[in-house]
Amino acid sequence: MFRKHALIRKELMEMVRTSRLLIWIVFCAFFGIASPLTAYFMPDILSMVGATENIVINIGTITYGDALEQYTKNFSQIGTIVLILISMGSVAAEKADGSIQFLLVRPVGHVAIVGAKLATLAAMLLIGIAISAVAMGFYTWYLFPGFPVFPFVVSNIFLLLYFFTIGSVVIAISTMVDKPILAGVGALGIWLLSSLAGMVRTLGDFSFVKLVDQVVQTVEGFPFEWEPTAGALLLMCVTLPLGIMRFSRWEPTD
Amino acid sequence: MTGESFVLVLPLLVLELVLKIICFRDWLHRRRFNGLPKFVWLFVFLLVTLFGPVVYLVYGRKLDGND
Amino acid sequence: MGMIETTDLKKRYSSVTALDGVTLSIEEGTVFGFLGPNGAGKTTLIRILTGMIGASGGSYTIGGEKGQAARTHIGYLAQQPTFYGWMTGRELLEISGSLYGMSTSLLERKIPEMLRLCGVEDAADRKIATYSGGMRQRLGIAQAILHDPKVVFLDEPVSALDPIGRKEVLTLIGILRERTTIFMSSHILDDVQRVCDEVAIIHKGTIRIHEKTDNLLRLHAKPVVILEFATREDVALCSEVLQTLGIPCGKVNYELSIPSDVFETKRGEILSLIGSGDLRLERLNRKDATLEEVFMHHIEEVPHVS
């Protein structure tokens, strides 16, 4: 019992002291507030641009749907990059500088080490997404009458799963390689591939990237589609065991 | 900009300010930096919105086990 | 049964064999010195025994147990330890102890004691990133012994330290010997001779000799007479002739060493040979037995120090 606690305590401390938690929270809060504002002020922004360029831009009525689109598209894409950046050093950097040896000679398994990282990743994502959901929910409710706040807050579970999938892939690749940058590039590659695959019919339904669309669908009252969730779970079930297997055979290079 | 709009946007400005203050305090005491010289990093996180501080905190500081 | 038992341990990489069948038995309470030149396989063996890496063949037990269970009995200090720089020394010990299953109340009692013993109490609440090399090494010893392990592995514990740091760490090892079995590797013969009860010499992945330090010196290291010549050619020529006369000798750079007892009985012969051969003898010294002689003897290739 002490061992699991100690592993998680170490990961939590690292998350706080290296500012990863702070970066994620500020980032989430920022997009939670900025998305509805950008949608709301879009006509003003466009007319300002139009005035200087001497053109008239006509756009339809702005609705909460626009705010939601800003939120899902921008937040998920830029959030992916930020999440990859802050978690790519997860295991790889510890291998590179040798600090992972501290854990490896102690009576804890490789699975427990990676498990603690996943648990704290989930905690970090949950805190961030909760903040962004509340901020976005409040602003959109205030600016756009008729916004279904409760379904929206619930729909963030899909965003959470989406980010958790990305984070797990980063950690999985991070356990396989000795350089953080490789973990970053690898995860970015899988993300881009999944985005491309999302455009293919049938197969594309299983791309975890589609989890983001589920947010909009849930708010609009469409039924739950199981394929993206299954795809996300499958991706994690493949990459994490592979990573742990490679990790358990890892040796210091010096 | 109306007073109401300003109140709505204010939290964003506060967030940005908090980030920049955190970066600046870290920057003052740090001697070793990744990638760019010390003074260039100052401009990066002060002038670039949101991403300047994020990149500085993630990459600019040397945070390996021995630092 | 010994505290550490290894049977035919092997470690092969694609192009090199790092360990080629290591069989060792080390009794409880021993301070064991593991000697060998760089690249001989010292670190590889320690990494296998600490469970950090797997072996290609053979088996081992520590305190009679295998695998992850064996890891509960050990403490380990790496050659160049890297600890999380964002932690404080005290936090590192807390995490370390918990990972070995120590309770909070036990940690509250043990940690201050360890910090004091290892001389890092003043720096206990500072970030490890700010520690000097010597402080980091002492904290490293604290985290290796905090949980009262049955065996402590120290990989080159003093080779990176300045003379003061070296003395401090060796003193610490002297205190530790009362509590636990110590397995330390080194290439500094002097340190090993000072603190170790038993010595093994490893070279090219095999154990060349394993003896009690006293026995080793008594049986294998004899006092020698060192003849120092002006040129390497003279050394080569002299050793050639001596060997044809059946006189054993070893040569290192400008020096030729002959066992003291042999030199005494054949003194006249050797000196007249040097005189007649027009060899320029610079100095003649008598030297007591040291581990260095044994070490050199068991490692055929002597590194040239110019």
Image (cartoon, coloured by chain):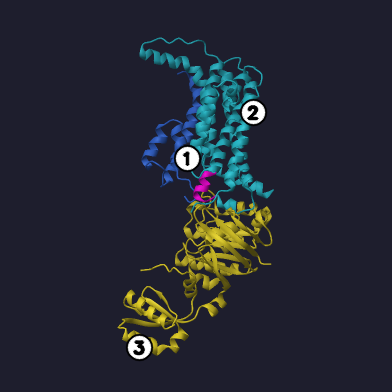
Asked if labels 1 and 3 touch by Cβ distance under 8 angstroms, the answer is no
Q: Are marks 3 and 1 on the same chain?
A: no
Distance from the alpha carbon under mark 2 to that under mark 1 = 28 Å
Q: In this rendered view, identify the residue nearer to me: C236 or A75.
A: C236
The vertical placement of C113 against A18, above or below, is: below
The relative height of residue A151 versus residue B23 in the rendered view (above or below) is above
Residue denoted by label 1: A181
Look at label 3 and name its amino acid.
Ser
Give the spatial CA distance, label 3 vs label 1: 71 Å
Q: Nearer the viewer, mark 3 or mark 1?
A: 3
| Range shown magenta | A90-99
Could you say which is closer to the camera, residue C126 or residue B11? C126
Residue identifier under label 2: A230
Same chain assignment for discs 2 and 1? yes
Chain for colour blue:
B
Identity, as a three-letter code, of the amino acid under mark 2? Ala
Mark 2 or 1: in front is 2
Query: Measured from the top left, where is residue C87 in percent x and y?
Result: 54, 50
Give chain C's shade: yellow
